[in-house]
Structures are given as structure tokens and as C-alpha cells.
Image: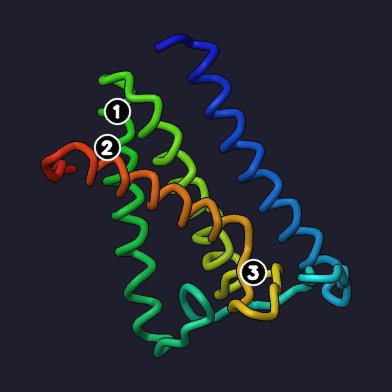
Amino acid sequence: MTKIKVVFINLVALLLFIADRLLKIYLIRNPNTAWDFKIFDFHLWLNPGIAFGLQLNPQLINILIPVIAIIILLLVFYLIKEYRQQNLFLIFFLTLLLLGAISNLIDRFLYDAVIDYWDCYFWPIFNLADIMIVVGATGWLIKILNSGKPKRI
């Protein structure tokens, strides 16, 4: 594993995280801003529920937050293991997953909701962190399914 490859994949994931955070900060400070494109819009939407706009009892969400924090911590340990094994594929996808989850968790702590902004009309409104989570989890799942045996965390 070359250091240049590791720096590159971490830089890509970090830039996506920063882009998500900057968009969220901008939209919170300018809540009436909307960018209208042909197939999608960008505008502020505070999602008090969970993924894809699913609504849950607020007390259940308060229980989920520490669970998500624990899962993030376990994923960090798994990521460290993948660094030791020099698995660039999993390092990239786990880093995407972790940074996306951390970005949305920051929103939960700051605003008691996740800031969503990408509205494609045919899909529930979402954000870049959601894309990072889905891509990261999908890459991780593909690696697990291709390994022939399930991996333990």
C-alpha cells in the first residue's frame, strides 16, 4: 500500500465531508436559499426522522443516537484493522461511511435533526453525507460478499 494512494483516498473522502458540512452550514445560515436545476433542487430541509425521511418517535431517535455513536466507534476499530491489513478498497469505503455518519450525527447534536438539501423529486430529500453512507456501506457489503465468508468486526 503506497502512502500516496492512502492520502488520495482519504483526501477524496475528507473533501466530500467538507463539502457536505459547508453546504449544511450555508443553508442553515441562509434558510430561504434554493437552487433550482432541471432535475433536482437544493434547499434546506430539517429531517427530524431517519434515513429517507422516515419518521420515528422522538424518544426512539434519542435512543438511536448513542447506538449510532457506538457503531461509529466499532467501525473506527474495524477501519484501523483494515489499515493494518493494507486493504485500500475497504479503507476507502469505510472512511466514506464513517465520515457520512459523523456528518449526520453532528447535525443531530447541533440541530436535533439532520440537514437534508438535495431534492430529486422522485426520491426522498437527502444530503451528500447520505450518499457517502450508502456508497460506503455498499462497497463494504460487496467486499464481504466477494470474500466468501462473512467478516467479523
Residues under numbered marks 2 and 3 in contact, where contact means CB atoms less than 8 Å apart: no
Q: What amino acid is labelled 1 in the image?
A: Glu
Give whichever of discs 2 and 3 has the lower sequence position: 2
Q: Nearer the viewer, residue 141 or 11?
A: 141
Q: What amino acid is labelled 2 in the image?
A: Tyr
Q: Quadrant of residue 1?
A: top left
Q: Nearer the viewer, mark 3 or mark 1?
A: 1
Would you name the residue on which mark 2 appears?
78
* Quarter of the figure with the C terminus: top left
Q: Which mark is residue 82?
A: 1
Q: Residue furthest top?
A: 2
Residues under numbered marks 3 and 1 in contact, where contact means CB atoms less than 8 Å apart: no
Would you name the residue on which mark 3 appears?
115
- Judged left or right of residue 11, residue 29 is right
130 lies above or below 149: below
- Judged left or right of residue 78, residue 93 is right
Q: Nearer the viewer, residue 14 or 65?
A: 14
